[in-house]
Image: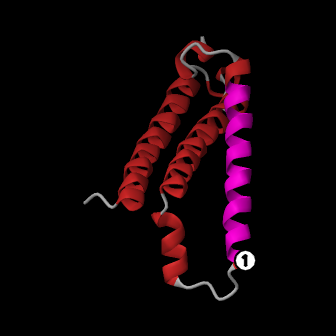
Amino acid sequence: MVTAVTSWGRSGLYDWLVQRFSAVVLAVYTVVVVGFIVLHPGLTYGEWSGLFDQLWMRIFSLLVLVCTIAHGWIGLWGVLTDYITTRMIGNAALKLRMLALLIYALISISFLVWGVEILWGFS
């Protein structure tokens, strides 16, 4: 029942693959950004802005934002199902899990909209 409510019926393998893919994307992005900073010791705003003016970096940054949200969703679901159980607090556990996931979803949607606005300059 918990799987059907919070994971929308997907398998554990699907969640595992999404989590691993998103982790790789986040790691590669970290290497790219740190590498850029290391290769530009006197980094100026113009150079930093120039990096994010490139279409590939905007798309990559948006992918990272989506991967961060997906990675967090799966991680939060795992933690909630491990530590907030019906054995501990009864049926209120399901409501508490859903409330926490709803709050995460609302925050994630806000950050996604904000990220798109930052990356593409929509106002």
Quadrant of the image occupied by residue 71? top right
Query: Residue drawn at (71%, 68%), measured in percent from left and top?
Result: 34
Q: Name the residue at the bottom extreme.
A: 42
Q: Which of these two is toward me, 48 or 111?
A: 48
Residue lying farthest left? 123
In the rendered image, residue 55 lying in the magenta stretch gets the answer no
Where does the image place residue 27, in percent across and percent down from the top left?
74, 52
Q: Main secondary structure of the magenta part?
A: helix
Q: Is residue 108 left or right of residue 64?
A: left
Q: Nearer the viewer, residue 97 or 48?
A: 48
Q: Which residue is mark 1?
A: 39
Residues drawn in magenta: 15-38
Residue 23 within the segment the image draws in magenta: yes
Does any portion of residue 79 appear in the rendered image? Answer: no
Q: What amino acid is found at the position of numbered circle 1 in the picture?
A: Leu
Q: Is residue 110 visible?
A: yes
**Which SS class for mark 1?**
helix
Q: Quadrant of the N terminus?
A: top right
Q: Position of residue 67 (x, y in %)?
A: 59, 42
Q: Is residue 66 left or right of residue 112?
A: right
| Quadrant containing the C terminus in the rendered view | bottom left
Residue 117 figure quarter: bottom left
Q: Position of residue 38 (x, y in %)?
A: 74, 77
